[in-house]
Amino acid sequence: MARAQKAQVWKESYKDMYDTSLDRKIDHIIQCVDAPNNTLFEIIENIRNKYPAIDPELVQIIVQGELGRHITSPACNDCGSRVHKKYDNKRECVTTIGTITINCPYYVCPKCKAVHTPYEDALNLRDGKYQYDMQKIAALFGAKETFEEAAEMMNEIYRFDICADTVHKLTNQVASEISLAEITPTAEEVAQIVEYISEDNYRRPVLVFSADGAMVPIRTEEKGQPHCWREAKGIRGYLLDKDKVVHLLSWHQISNVNEFREFLADLRRQDVIPLDKVRLCFVGDGAKWIWDCVKEYFPECRQVLDYYHCSEHLHAFAKIHFPEKEKARSWIEQTKVRLFHNNASHVIAGLNRMKCKTAEAKAERGNLVNYLKTK
């Protein structure tokens, strides 16, 4: 009997401690909600900063109550008439703290027939059940892993069922809305990095841009439709000086030449690159569209032919022209040295003097000469 009484006392003590903790937690969640000033994304971010794990039902109750307390029957934004409530719509919202369901009233203006959804507007709910904090996580995982692996990790961490296709859609929607300003450092930030890398050096650092394009398979949005091939273009910029390599920016996406040209035009218009404090270099595979874009917006830069693409062309010719592997290897290495010292004219002259024994070797030599002349 005495033991049962002691257990009851401890239960009451635990309940009191939990009630005290719950009161503090509710006060903090109410501050995080701050209806109608915070969106659902902001509410979730604020709560997770304090409570990485929390009962979503508690958050749901407080959000619903605070919205009802602060948002009354609104007036029509279009004509100013008082609107009438038509029905409630239960919005299932999957978030990083769990699934919460918000009962959202729908209002209609009797005069202009405009529809108003004040709860959805205040919370800035995303179409569909996955909300913006989930989209943020999906984009982070989807950018680093395959969509299947990203879905698997999200399901393991957050304990809900999301498929790879949904991760793909959420990630693509984020990518389509990212602007150049969001991925490009400001002129002030670049100036600080240049100053850091230039410290104690009498020569200006080299700002290297490298660009390339490739065809990539793209899955179609419509079910049952085969994938298609689209061209992806990318560019990376970094500062180089002795043993220091500092990344500045990178950009790659499905795009055409005009969109790539606009990217360079924006860099020029925003004066992101301090041309008086760096030596500008552009590395490319020799594609005409790259050099044309670079000349248009950065005519002062040094154009450098990419080593690996150039080497690929040298090997293609040597494999056909030289029957012995050792001779082919020797010619390739000597030619690389000449090109490294900017003696392309000597290499072209030597190629023109070669006596090709087959039509195939002659044609491949012509391709290589044209490649070196135009690059």
Image (cartoon, rainbow, N blue to C red):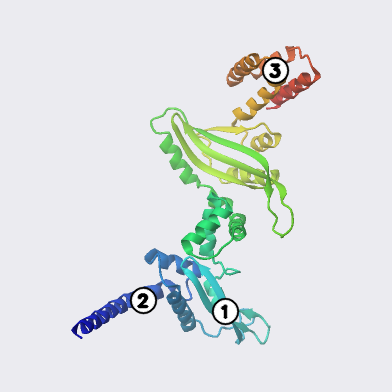
> Residue drawn at (45%, 73%), measured in percent from left and top?
56
Q: Could you tell me residue 43's position as x and y percent?
A: 45, 69
Along the line of sight, which residue is nearer the eye, 236 or 20? 20
Which amino acid type is shown beneath numbered disc 3? Ile
* Residue 55 visible in image: yes
Q: Which mark is residue 348?
A: 3
Along the line of sight, which residue is nearer the eye, 343 or 294? 343
- Residue 119 is left or right of residue 61, and the answer is right
Write down the quadrant of residue 305 in the picture: top right
Depth check, mark 2 against mark 1: the one in front is: 1
Q: Which one is earlier in the sequence, the residue at label 2 or at label 3?
A: 2
Asked if marks 3 and 1 touch (Cβ < 8 Å), the reply is no
Q: Which one is earlier in the sequence, the residue at label 3 or at label 1?
A: 1
Near mark 2 (Cα within 10 A), the count class, few <14, some 14-19 or many ≥20, is few
* Residue 39 visible in image: no
Label 2: state its secondary structure: helix
How many angstroms separate mark 3 from mark 1 (CA)?
73 Å
> Residue drawn at (62%, 17%), measured in percent from left and top?
329
> Residue drawn at (56%, 63%), measured in percent from left and top?
162
Label 3: state its secondary structure: helix
Depth check, mark 3 against mark 1: the one in front is: 1
Which amino acid type is shown beneath numbered disc 2? Asp
Label 1: state its secondary structure: strand
Which residue is the site of mark 2? 27
Near mark 3 (Cα within 10 A), the count class, few <14, some 14-19 or many ≥20, is some
Q: Which mark is residue 90?
A: 1
**Furthest-right residue in this view:** 359
Vertical relation: 210 (above or below) 130:
above
Q: Could you tell me residue 263's position as x and y percent?
A: 62, 45
How many callouts does the rendering have?
3
Along the line of sight, which residue is nearer the eye, 96 or 88? 96
